[in-house]
Structures are given as structure tokens and as C-alpha cells.
Image (tube, rainbow, N blue to C red):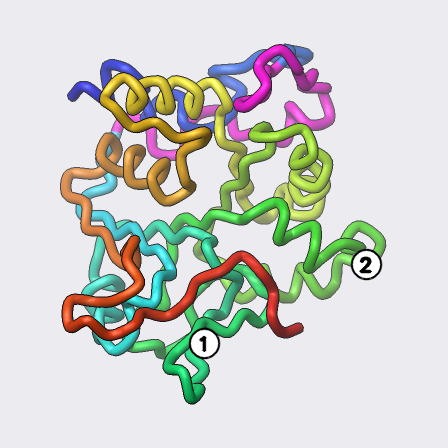
């Protein structure tokens, strides 16, 4: 209730034509004195309203990509949720590479949708975060040749994507280029910088002192407003599991093309 009255994820989580106006100057989340003008060509590609306004998403699964999911067989339970949200802590598909030092995440330079038939993380995804830095590094020339990116997106026909276009100024160009590639066939949602800044202030007032909230924390906070019941998987801030075994290393860094 406190989150809803403060932050209103159901009405302001994303940039839409309902909560922003054409040619409006949008302040960046991390630098509110710097603004981006929502030019008509970008504005018309935004959703008219929040995709799920006025209804609960039911039982939700918010899935990170921490190694704590390894050997849990949580995939079926995750896929049974009414609505599944996945973060992009690592690029996808995330596969487990057995090495002498244990299990590590092997990044294959893709978005972080779960690999097919993976019994640990599931395969379904309704809403998926894209990291702008990963997109820029992995698909740096996608505006010159969109075929590789389109082939990857076509594998996930039932998934909407979201990206922090206005988190930092350097994220905007690649995010808008992605919007142009995906529109109108696919849904790409921009996080509202006003919502994220309000959410940051909400948790800061409750003692959480961070320069910026993590993507997972943002999505869990939003899910607590949008869903009747929230189950969280793959978030584990410790180097060992409950059996004192080392967990897989999760990194933004690409280790294999």
C-alpha cells in the first residue's frame, strides 16, 4: 500500500502517451537537470497507456540469474506463474559451464531469456529487461544490419521488453534505435525516470542508501504493486549457498561470443 501511494507503478512505471506529452522534456533519472525532448517520431512509438492498467497480474515470478538457481529444478514452478519477469544480470541464454573450480555462468552474448527446456530457470517470459550497455556492446552495428537482432527477438514472440532509456544519457541513443527496430511488431517499454527516482527516494527514506537501485530491486518493487503474490528466484547476495557451497559467478562481462 505504501509503495502504491508513493510510486504508483500501475500508472507510471513506463513512459507512455498518457503520462508524458509530445515534445515534453524528460529529466534523466540520475541527472534530472539534463533532459531529453520526446520528439514526435519517438512519441508516436510509445504505448498509449500502461499495458496492465486496471488489473492485477496475479501470481508473479521475478527471476534473476544468480547461480543459486543451479540444480534447484525451479523451472516448472517458475513457468507456472501467471506472469514472469526476468532481469538481465547476465546475457542469454545462460548456460552452466562445468570447470575444475565449479559452476560458472557462461555468457553467450544474447539477451537473458532462459534456454529452452531448462529445468532450473524455466522457459516462459512475459516481461524482460534489456541492459543498454550489453545491447551496445553485443549488437553495436544493429542499425546497419538488423537481421541478427531480429532473428533473436523472433524467438520470443510472447515477450515484452523494457529498457532504461533515460537512466543515463549514454543509454538513450541505443534504446531509441532499438525501439525503431522493434516497432510496431514488438513491445519495447521505457522505464519512467520519474518513477525510478521516486522509488529510489522511497527506499532511501527507509534506510537503503545506494547510488542507484539495482534492476532486480526495481522490478521486485514494481511487482509488489502490480501482482497479488510475488515469488522471487535467482537473487542471492552471498558467495555460498545454504550448504556452504560456492554459487556461480554472475557478471555483466561477456566471456564468449
| Label 2–label 1 contact, CB within 8 A | no
Residue 138: percent from the left, percent from the top? 68, 59
Q: Is residue 61 above or below residue 15?
A: below
For label 1, the SS is strand
User: Is 145 on the left-hand or right-hand side of 6?
Assistant: right
For label 2, the SS is loop
Q: Residue at x 42, y 51 (%)?
A: 87
Residue 161: percent from the left, percent from the top? 50, 46
Image quadrant in which you'd find residue 53: top left
Q: Nearer the viewer, residue 100 or 96?
A: 100
Q: Which mark is residue 145?
A: 2
Image quadrant in which you'd find residue 203: top left
Residue 248: percent from the left, percent from the top? 37, 70
Q: Are there few (<14), some (14-19), or many (20+) residues within 10 Å of tag 2? A: few
Residue 72 covered by magenta stretch: no
Q: Are there few (<14), some (14-19), or many (20+) residues within 10 Å of tag 1? A: some
Residue lying furthest right: 144
User: Is 97 on the left-hand or right-hand side of 230?
Assistant: right
Q: Nearer the viewer, residue 127 or 66?
A: 66
Task: Look at the image and give the residue range highlighted in magenta.
Answer: 26-54
Which of pointers 2 and 1 lies earlier in the amino acid sequence? 1
Between the C-alphas of marks 2 and 1, the distance is: 27 Å
Q: Specify the quadrant that holds the C terminus.
A: bottom right
Q: Residue at x 34, y 33 (%)?
A: 52
Q: Residue at x 38, y 61 (%)?
A: 65
Q: Specify the quadrant that holds the N terminus.
A: top left
Q: Which mark is residue 208?
A: none
Q: Is residue 29 above or below residue 186?
A: above
Q: Which residue is mark 1?
A: 95
User: Is 136 on the left-hand or right-hand side of 230?
Assistant: right
Amino acid at each position: 500500500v505504501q509503495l502504491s501511494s508513493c510510486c504508483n507503478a500501475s500508472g507510471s512505471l513506463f513512459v507512455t502517451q498518457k503520462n508524458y506529452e509530445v515534445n515534453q522534456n524528460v529529466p534523466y533519472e540520475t541527472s534530472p537537470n539534463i533532459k531529453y525532448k520526446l520528439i514526435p517520431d519517438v512519441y508516436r512509438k510509445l504505448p498509449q497507456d500502461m499495458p496492465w492498467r486496471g488489473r492485477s497480474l496475479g501470481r508473479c515470478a521475478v527471476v534473476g540469474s544468480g547461480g543459486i538457481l543451479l540444480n534447484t529444478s525451479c523451472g516448472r514452478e517458475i513457468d507456472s506463474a501467471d506472469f514472469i519477469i526476468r532481469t538481465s544480470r547476465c546475457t542469454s541464454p545462460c548456460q552452466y559451464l562445468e570447470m575444475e573450480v565449479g559452476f560458472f555462468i557462461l555468457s553467450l552474448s544474447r539477451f537473458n531469456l532462459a534456454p529452452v527446456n531448462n529445468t532450473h530457470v524455466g522457459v516462459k517470459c512475459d516481461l524482460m529487461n534489456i541492459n543498454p550497455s550489453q545491447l551496445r556492446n553485443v549488437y553495436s552495428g544493429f542499425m546497419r544490419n538488423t537481421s541478427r537482432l531480429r532473428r533473436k527477438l523472433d524467438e520470443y514472440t510472447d515477450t515484452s521488453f523494457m529498457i532504461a532509456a533515460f537512466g543515463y544519457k549514454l543509454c538513450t541513443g541505443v534504446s531509441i534505435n532499438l525501439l525503431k527496430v522493434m516497432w510496431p511488431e514488438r513491445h519495447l517499454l521505457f522505464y519512467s525516470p520519474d518513477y525510478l527516482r521516486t522509488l529510489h527516494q522511497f527506499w532511501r527514506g527507509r534506510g537503503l542508501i545506494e547510488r542507484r537501485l539495482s534492476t532486480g530491486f526495481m522490478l521486485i518493487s514494481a511487482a509488489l504493486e502490480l501482482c497479488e503474490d510475488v515469488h522471487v528466484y535467482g537473487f542471492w547476495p552471498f558467495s555460498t549457498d545454504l550448504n556452504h557451497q560456492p554459487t556461480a559467478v554472475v557478471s555483466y562481462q561477456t566471456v564468449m561470443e
